[in-house]
Image (cartoon, rainbow, N blue to C red):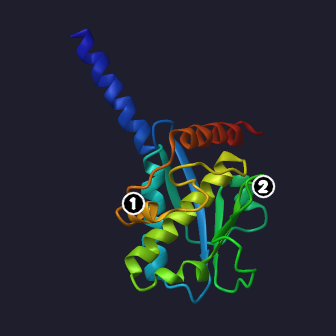
Amino acid sequence: MKLVFIVVAALLTIATSTAKGGPAGRTLKVYVIPAPDVPMTIVGPAKETVRKIYSRVGILVQYSPVFPKGGQAHREMAMVVRISTDCDEPPQGGIAVAQPYEGSWIQVRYNRVKWAAKNPVFTSTLLGYVMAHEIAHNLQGIARHSDTGIMKARWSAEEYTRITVHELRFDPHDVHLIDLGWQSRHARP
C-alpha cells in the first residue's frame, strides 16, 4: 500500500511539473515579430514547430502577441525573434543571426528561406527549425555549432529530409548545453 502511494505521488509530481513547462517547470517566453510581408500562414506553423522541438527537451514555449518594451525581453529572459525581408547583406551571410552573449535578440532573414516557397508547409517547417536553432544559440550562451542535428552549421540534403518530417533533433551534447545555459540564465539576480 505504501509503495502504491509513493508511485501515485511521483506520477502526480511529474504531471504537475510537466504542466508547468516540462520536467523542471521551464517556460520560455518568445516574441515573434514578422515583417508585414511575411505571411502569417507561414509564421503560425513555424511557431508551432519551435514549440514541438523545445517540448522534446522539456521547455514549454509561450508566445506573446505584443512587442516587448525597453529592456522587457531581457528582464523576462525572453527571446525576441525578428523575421525580416529587407536584409541586403552579402550572399555569404547566413539565414539568421543570434546574439548568444546578449541572450535575447534573433534576426531571421526570411528572404533566405523563401527558396522553399514552392511548398508552404516546408517553408514554415524550415522557418521553425531556423528559429529553434537560433534560440538554442541564445539559450546555450555560446557561439558554436555541432556536427549533427539542429545545431549543425549547414544542413545537408539528409537533414532537410528529416526537417520535412519533423525528425531532426538536438544532439545530446546540445541538450546538455541548453540545460547548462538555462541554469546560468536563471541563476542571475
Name the residue rendered at 65%, 60% in the picture: 79
145 relative to 75 in the view: left or right: left
Kindly tell me whether residue 177 is visible in this rendering: yes
Q: How many marks?
A: 2
Residue 33 picture location, percent across and down: 62, 75
Task: Identify residue for label 2.
Answer: 102
154 relative to 16 in the view: left or right: right
In front of the other: 153 or 53: 153
Task: Identify residue for label 1.
Answer: 162
Locate the C terminus and report the quarter of the image it occupies. Answer: top right
Name the residue rendered at 27%, 17% in the picture: 5
Looking at the image, is 183 positioned above or below residue 114?
Answer: above
Numbered disc in front, either 1 or 2: 1
Alpha carbon distance from label 1 to label 2 = 31 Å
81 relative to 70 in the view: left or right: left
Kindly tell me whether residue 77 is visible in this rendering: no
| Residue situated furthest bottom in the rendering | 37
Name the residue rendered at 72%, 52% in the picture: 143
Q: Secondary structure at mark 2?
A: loop
Looking at the image, is 96 positioned above or below residue 143?
Answer: below
Amino acid under disc 2: Glu
Q: Which picture quadrant has residue 174? A: top right
